[in-house]
Image: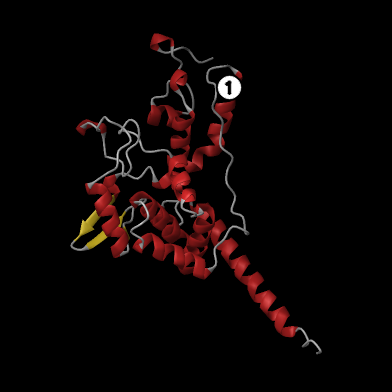
Amino acid sequence: MPRPASGGARRVGPPQLRQNCQLDLSALTQEVLDLWLTTHPTRRQGIGAFVRWTLARHLTSGIKLPSEVKADASHFLTEDEHYGQLRRFLNDDQLPLDVRITGAMVGLYGMQVTRIVTLTTDRFHKEETDWYVTFDREPVLLPPKLGRLIEEQIRHPARVSMLEQLPGDGPRYLWPGRPASRPIGGGWAHTRLKRHGLPSLSARNTAMTEFVAELPPIVVSDLLGIDPGTAHKWARFAQDSWADYLAACTNDDAKPPERS
């Protein structure tokens, strides 16, 4: 049985979680769990048993493991809708800056909103006039307009906390939360997109299918920092969808013309 740590607080759980969070179960909140799942997406299965264990023994309360979102073939944008949204994000000065940046990154790179809000400013760098973002290990070139939007956000970050982040607290988040040493919540960003009539799920699904149609899954995995298995699943999904489309076109061509 796990033993209480100093001060009576239990520090138990998977080694990775203890190492990354210095977990004090009495202080474990849904926000902390969501953030850990966002930054460790491949460890969801192992953490599920741990969360149930803590709840059964009343070591935690009010937390739950979010259900894993599955790609829904009905949640996609047409080509015109997709590029229309991207043009709006990059050109519409009436949209808030955070909405433009978040929406553009979802539509261009198929990034989850909950992951975008955890990006720190050191993930972005400029070489001469070009801006790059590093999601995992390899830098990705940003469109010039998106680069300028991010540069503006880095120079003039909107804060929801009165307390600024201290120099020793680590890299600054692109969207500082409360406190500023933590990112803004993913739910906040989702709400902001929906408020302006911008669905994130369909945009993300469309972007991912286009990404895997243009690049091998292993390259997509390296660039976006997603699990190779996930990238291969998206590639198979895109191939199956394309095959179904071609089959439908062939069947339509094979039909005899209707009599007038």
Which residue is at a point 57% across and 61% down the rendered structure image? 76
Residue placed at 31% from the left, 54% from the top?
A: 133
Q: Is residue 26 above or below residue 188?
A: above
Residue extending farthest front = 94
Percent position of residue 18, x then y: 42, 27
- Rendered-image quadrant of the N terminus: top right
Q: Quadrant of residue 54?
A: top right
Residue 238 in picture, x, y percent from top left: 57, 64
**Vertical side of 174 occupied by 257: above or below:** below
What is the count of numbered marks?
Answer: 1
The residue to which callout 1 is attached is 55
Q: How was the colour assigned to the protein in this rendering? A: secondary structure
Q: Which residue is drawn at 24% across and 32% down?
A: 164
- In the image, 165: left or right of 85? left
Query: How far across and down, in percent of the image, does residue 70 sit?
Result: 59, 50
Can the viewer see residue 186? yes
Q: Looking at this view, name the residue that lies furthest to the left.
A: 128
Identified by mark 1, the residue type is Leu
Q: Relative to 50, is 137 above or below?
A: below
Front in this rendered view, residue 28 or 50 = 28
Looking at the rendered image, the quarter that the C terminus falls into is bottom right
Q: What secondary structure is found at the residue carrying circle 1?
A: helix
Please give left or right for residue 92 compared with residue 168 in the image. right
Residue 11 in view (yes/no): no
Q: Which residue extends farthest right?
A: 259
Report whether 51 appears left or right of 99: right
Density class for disc 1 (Cα within 10 Å; few <14, some 14-19, many ≥20) is some
- Choose between 106 and 54: the one closer to the eye: 106
